[in-house]
Amino acid sequence: MPPIRVLVGEDQPLVREGIVRVLEEGGFEVVGTASDADELVRKAGGHHPDVVITDIQMPPENTDDGLRAAITIREREPRTGVIVLSQFLEDRYALDLVGERAEGVGYLLKDRVGDLARFVDAVQRVAEGGSALDPDVVQRMVGRRRGHSKLDDLTPRERQVLELMAQGRSNQGIADELIVTVAAVERHVTSIFTKLDLRQTPEDHRRVLAVLEFLRRS
Amino acid sequence: MALTVIIIDDDAAFRRVARELLEGNGINVVAEAADAQEARDACRRHAPDGVLLDINLPDASGHELARELSREQPALRILLTSTDAAAGGRRDARFLPKVELALNDLTAFFS
């Protein structure tokens, strides 16, 4: 089997050399390196590597340029996996990177590179279309995702009703606002409770719980 | 006998990579330090030939620490570095920003 082809983005030469060495020791072929985000996107388009590994903080802006380059590469090269290396745990970065597609994507703390076996395993998984997310990030994302997915089940109309509930409106008030019947609002409210799994408690309490859920997740 | 070096930097990933590369090139990294206090202790204990010293330490200025270590151990070779390319101030032969610092520079400086 031909070796997995990797492109490395890192602006500090010493760290770049270190990552390249670890990859080569792990049996990967490093097809190129880039020292800024623009160069990384360009080279990803030229080499079509199996995996791009990049630091988040990169020139030209030295903010999250590497992350944005990784997102661009994911869009343009759907068959290229991307791994971003972060100095600190920042779950917003991971969420932005993963988007709606958790295949061929990795988010790791930078000092995990030194753990050769785990790093090699992560690169392999991403090359094969899997994911390699730092365990701490996974934990946080799962918690957040669960809440998101419940609210995502709501129709736009139900969401609108819930928003009005969050403003403290009664069913009559919501009906007036949306110019529908009270019976229609009641049907929406029942559906919201069902979708948010708020079936076991009296209605007033469920109303509060639904609103709390909404406020927590918006 | 292999040269002995201490890496003083609060960035754990940088220390880990620098150590890996130096040791792969016959330089013995006898200790790592994440701040000035750890650096002082490590230098007293190991009396290394050189240190790779990040200017931005959490508890002291790397410039001050460099002066202090030089007083205690005049022959100590000190290579200053920083993620901030302007941090070296006036042209200092001992300063190389991280964006320029490569393995060759390290081996040349410490050999």
Image (tube, coloured by chain):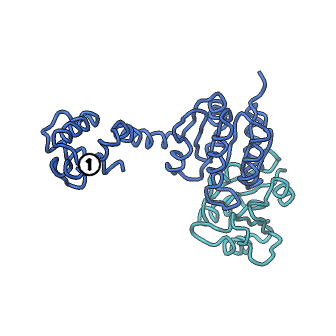
Q: Residue at x 35, y 42 (%)?
A: A156
Question: Which chain is painted in blue?
Answer: A
Q: Residue at x 38, y 41 (%)?
A: A148
Lateral position of residue A110 relative to residue A215, left or right: right
| Front one among B69 and A169 | A169
Mark 1 belongs to which amino acid? Leu
Chain letter, colour cyan: B
Is A173 on the left-hand or right-hand side of A18? left
Quick check: A114 above or below A25? below
Query: x, y percentage for residue A20?
Result: 76, 42
Q: In x, y percent, where is residue B2? A: 82, 50
Element under disc 1: helix
Residue drawn at 48 percent across, 43 percent down: A136
Which residue reaches farthest front? A179
Q: Quadrant of residue A106?
A: top right
Please give the residue where the numbered disc 1 appears in the rendered image: A212
Q: Quadrant of residue A130?
A: top right
Q: Residue at x 75, y 69 (%)?
A: B73
In this orientation, which residue lies closer to the viewer: A31 or B27?
Answer: A31
